[in-house]
Image: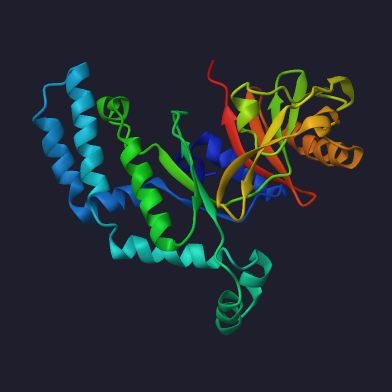
C-alpha cells in the first residue's frame, strides 16, 4: 500500500488487478523517480529551475517556457545508468515471468538469443489524470529510450510547470498486442457496460464506429440488454508493413463481435472487477489469439 503514493490511484489499481490474476501483456513500470534521476544526471533540473525563475509567468510565457524545456529534454542524452536499466528490463520481456523467476542466468541468456525482441507500447499513467498519448510500435532499446525521453518532454506542459507537478508521471512499458477484438468496459454504480469491436479500439474511442453493446447488472452480472451493431471497418497492425492499417469488413461487420466463450471470459473477470474497481472507471481489454488481456485503465473525471 505504500506504493499508492508513488504510483497514484490509477496505476496502483492496474497493478492490483494484475496481482489478482487478471492477465496483462508482459510489462514493466518506469516510475517518476526515473524522471527525477534523468533531470539530475543530465543537469537539466538546474537549467529548468533557472528558466522558470527568470520568467514572469503569464499564459504566453508558459507556452514559450514549455517549448524551451521540451527542447532541452529532447536534445539531451539519456544517461547510461538509466539506459542500462531500461535495456535490461526490455531484454527480460522476452522471457516468461515463471521462467525468469526459476531459471539460471545462463538459461535465460540462451532463451534470449533465440527470440526476437518484441514491439512495445509506452502508456503514461499520470496521477492527476492529465491526458498524455501513448507511443507505440517501438522496437529496440534505443527506440525505447527515445520514446521515454519524448514522454518526459511532453509531460512539461504549461499546466505542469505552473502547478509544479513534477512527481505525477509514471510509465507502463508493455508488449504490444495486435488484437482480433477490443473491449471497452465501464464500471458504474449499478451496471457494467461492455462495448466490443473487431480490431483495435481507436475507431470505437473516436466514435467512428458503433460497437456491440452489452449492459450487465453489477450485482448479478446477468446481461440486462444488448445490441449488435454493424461495423464498417476495422484497424489492425500489419506485421509486414509494421503499421496500423484499415480493412473494410463488408458482411463480417454484421456479425456479433463476441462469441459465447468470450462473453463468459469477460463475465469471469467482472466478478473480480465489481469487488476491486470503484465506479467511474473504464478498462480496455483485447482478445488476441483467444487470450484476454487488460491493457489500460482510465478514470472518468467528468
Question: In the rendered image, is residue 184 in sight?
Answer: no
Side of 251 relative to 95 (left or right): right
Which residue is located at x 28 percent, y 30 percent?
164
Identify the image quadrant of the C terminus.
top right
Residue 143 x %, y %: 41, 56
In the rendered image, the vertical position of residue 300 relative to residue 147, given as above or below: above
Residue 191 vs residue 243, the one in the foreground: 243
> Quarter of the image containing the N terminus?
top right
Q: Where is residue 73 shown, x and y percent of the image?
A: 25, 46
Residue 52, percent across and down?
Answer: 15, 32
Instruction: Residue at the far left: name it.
Output: 54
Residue toward you, 73 or 203: 203
Which of the pair 146/84 is nearer the observer? 146
Q: 41 above or below 114?
A: above
The image's colour scheme reads: rainbow
Q: How many marks?
A: 0
Residue 78's image quarter?
bottom left
Measuring from the top left, give residue 160's x and y in whole percent: 31, 29
Kindly identify the residue that appears in the image at 35 percent across and 36 percent down. 155
Is 166 situated above or below 92?
above
Describe residue 98's horizontal placement relative to residue 126 as left or right. Answer: right
Is residue 16 visible in the rendered image? The answer is yes
Question: At x 61% / y 71%, what residue is drawn?
Answer: 100
Quarter where residue 276 is shown: top right
Q: Which residue lies furthest to the top in this view?
A: 302
In the displayed structure, 116 sits above or below 251; it is below
What residue is at 55 percent from the left and 56 percent from the top?
119
Q: Report the side of 197 relative to 104 (left or right).
A: right
Amino acid at each position: 500500500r505504500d506504493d499508492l503514493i508513488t504510483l497514484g490511484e490509477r496505476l496502483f489499481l492496474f497493478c492490483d488487478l494484475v496481482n489478482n490474476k487478471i492477465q496483462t501483456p508482459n510489462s514493466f513500470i518506469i516510475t517518476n523517480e526515473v524522471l527525477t534521476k534523468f533531470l539530475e544526471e543530465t543537469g537539466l533540473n538546474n537549467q529548468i529551475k533557472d528558466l522558470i525563475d527568470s520568467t514572469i509567468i503569464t499564459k504566453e510565457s508558459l507556452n514559450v517556457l514549455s517549448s524551451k524545456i521540451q527542447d532541452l529534454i529532447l536534445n539531451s542524452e539519456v544517461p547510461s545508468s538509466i539506459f542500462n536499466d531500461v535495456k535490461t528490463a526490455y531484454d527480460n520481456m522476452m522471457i516468461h515471468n515463471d521462467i525468469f523467476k526459476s531459471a539460471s542466468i545462463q538459461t535465460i541468456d540462451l532463451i534470449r538469443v533465440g527470440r526476437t525482441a518484441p514491439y512495445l507500447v509506452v502508456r503514461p499513467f499520470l496521477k492527476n489524470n492529465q491526458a498524455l498519448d501513448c507511443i507505440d510500435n517501438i522496437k529496440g532499446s534505443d527506440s525505447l529510450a527515445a520514446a521515454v525521453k519524448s514522454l518526459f518532454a511532453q509531460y512539461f506542459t504549461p499546466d505542469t510547470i505552473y502547478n509544479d507537478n513534477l512527481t505525477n508521471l509514471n510509465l507502463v512499458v508493455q508488449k504490444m498486442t495486435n488484437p482480433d477484438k477490443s473491449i471497452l468496459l465501464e464500471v458504474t454504480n449499478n451496471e457494467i457496460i461492455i462495448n466490443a469491436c473487431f480490431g483495435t479500439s481507436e475507431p470505437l474511442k473516436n466514435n467512428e464506429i458503433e460497437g456491440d453493446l452489452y449492459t450487465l447488472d453489477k450485482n448479478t452480472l446477468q446481461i440486462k440488454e444488448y445490441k449488435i451493431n454493424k461495423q464498417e471497418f476495422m484497424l489492425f497492425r500489419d506485421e509486414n508493413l509494421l503499421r496500423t492499417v484499415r480493412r473494410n469488413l463488408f458482411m463480417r461487420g454484421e456479425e456479433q463481435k463476441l462469441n459465447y466463450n468470450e462473453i463468459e471470459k469477460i463475465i469471469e473477470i467482472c466478478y473480480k472487477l465489481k469487488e476491486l474497481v470503484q465506479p467511474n472507471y473504464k478498462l480496455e481489454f483485447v482478445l488476441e489469439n483467444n487470450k484476454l488481456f487488460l491493457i489500460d485503465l482510465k478514470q472518468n473525471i467528468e
